Amino acid sequence: MNRISCTLVSVLLALAVVKASQASEPAGQQVTAAGMQSSAVGPADFFTGRVRVDPLYSANQNINASGAYVTFEPGARSAWHTHPEGQYLVVVAGVGRTQEWGKPVQEIKAGDVVWCPPGVKHWHGAASNVAMTHLAVTGTKEGKNVQWMEKVSDEQYASR
């Protein structure tokens, strides 16, 4: 085959790939195997105590939300923060606490679902003597999903 024929075949193959990618059928499922994303330590600037974040998925062009498991050791908690598009927390293990600014601390347990509306200042973490893990599903706006604020004081954490 001469160079012109090889070039023509390459162009035709490239056009076929482009046309196939523009087909109206949706893309297939994607599976991210467990353990393919590394756990991270919750940064001390945004958390008090030992916190582990296990990312699950990022926001993308198809769904404007990210997901992660967050595990708080006893007494650990987030700083005060807001979410521009809100956040769902699904408690999957243990006992925790959450508080909206100006309201009392609430206890949360495995099976509870917490809705944190957009722009509402709040924090969440573990109970003082029991760890807590929640699934966080967090909306994203213009590439941002959280606005961190001041840390929760020991007095705020202990209040009821």
Image (cartoon, rainbow, N blue to C red):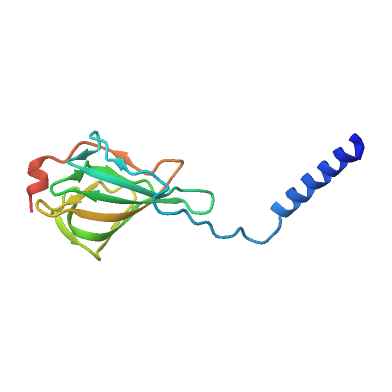
Q: Nearer the viewer, residue 7 or 91?
A: 7
Q: Nearer the viewer, residue 132 or 150?
A: 132
Residue 144, position as x, y percentages in the image: 41, 41
Q: In percent of the image, x 27 and y 43: which residue is there?
A: 81
Residue 128, position as x, y percentages in the image: 10, 51
Q: Is residue 7 above or below residue 90?
A: above
Q: Nearer the viewer, residue 63 or 28?
A: 28
Q: How many marks?
A: 0
Q: In percent of the image, x 33 and y 48: which residue is there?
A: 54
In the image, taking residue 2 as reference, residue 52 lies left or right, namely left
Q: Is residue 100 above or below residue 7?
A: below
Residue 159, position as x, y percentages in the image: 7, 49
Q: Nearer the viewer, residue 88 or 29?
A: 29
In the image, taking residue 14 as reference, residue 107 lies left or right, namely left
Of the 4 image quadrants, the one containing the C terminus is bottom left
Residue 68, position as x, y percentages in the image: 35, 51
Q: In percent of the image, x 71 and y 57: which residue is there?
A: 23
Q: In terms of image quadrants, where is residue 52?
A: top left
Direction bottom: furthest residue: 111
